[in-house]
């Protein structure tokens, strides 16, 4: 799948609106992610309000580019959707939420869009700042923010060979 190899973090966007059909495709791709016992713990906030994008860009260092994006999608974990009785649910949702986010990032490349993933969880300051902006109920945890837009540089998504044979072991470590 060429999207896996061509996906890059894109931080500069054209000021061009993202079509509703493309937003829906991003969300559908995200919701196709695997989850334990098919619990599908995700929810999303689609943000295209410039004032909110500006606020999100202040959640912590490295989030500044969100204010330049025409759109951001906040990916949330709903703890009520986890029916398994884990000791600490926040230890278990990152893999599922990461798969959800990765699906969205790959679909964006397929649609000719650029994205950058801005970490929320587990950075307490960012989670707290996102909570201030959106006033989430207690069961909702912000996982990350994905800034989305048409890349300023049309070659922003490109193939870069990262394969490193020295990192591969067979049957045992040494």
Image: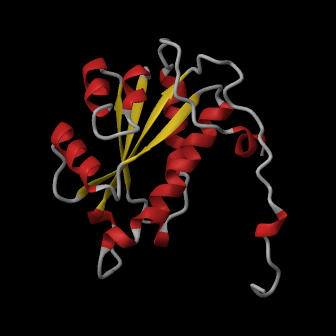
Q: Foreground residue, 4 or 60?
A: 60
> Residue 121 in the image: x percent, y percent?
35, 55
Determine the image quadrant of residue 54: top left
Q: Foreground residue, 55 or 22?
A: 55
Question: On screen, 144 above or below 25?
Answer: below
Residue drawn at point x = 63 percent, y = 42 percent: 106
> Residue 78 in the image: x percent, y percent?
30, 58
Residue drawn at point x = 66 percent, y = 39 percent: 7
Question: On screen, 61 above or below 150?
Answer: below
What is the residue that sits farthest to the top in this orientation?
Answer: 15
> Residue 13 in the image: x percent, y percent?
52, 19
Tell me if 65 is positioned left or right of 55 in this view. Answer: right
Please state the total of marks drawn on the protein image.
0
Tell me if 40 is positioned left or right of 128 in this view. Answer: right
Colour mapping:
secondary structure
Q: Foreground residue, 44 or 72?
A: 72
> Residue 39 in the image: x percent, y percent?
42, 65
Tell me if 64 is positioned left or right of 154 in this view. Answer: left
Q: Quadrant of the C terminus?
A: bottom right
Residue drawn at point x = 51 percent, y = 36 percent: 116
Residue drawn at point x = 50 percent, y = 48 percent: 101
Question: On screen, 85 above or below 11?
Answer: below
């Amino acid at each position: 799948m060429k999207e896996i190899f061509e996906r890059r973090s894109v931080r500069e966007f054209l000021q061009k609106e993202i079509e509703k059909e493309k937003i829906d495709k991003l969300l559908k791709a995200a919701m196709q992610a695997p989850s334990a016992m098919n619990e599908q713990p995700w929810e999303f906030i689609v943000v295209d309000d410039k004032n909110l994008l500006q606020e999100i860009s202040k959640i912590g260092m490295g989030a500044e580019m969100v204010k330049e994006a025409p759109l951001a999608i906040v990916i949330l974990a709903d703890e009520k959707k986890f029916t398994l009785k884990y000791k600490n649910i926040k230890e278990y949702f990152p893999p599922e939420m990461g798969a959800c986010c990765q699906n969205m990032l790959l679909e964006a490349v397929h649609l000719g869009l650029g994205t950058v993933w801005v970490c929320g969880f587990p950075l307490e300051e960012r989670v707290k700042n996102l909570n201030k902006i959106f006033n989430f109920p207690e069961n909702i945890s912000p996982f990350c923010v994905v800034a989305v837009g048409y890349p300023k540089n049309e070659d922003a998504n490109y193939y870069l060979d990262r394969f490193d044979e020295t990192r591969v072991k067979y049957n045992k470590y040494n």
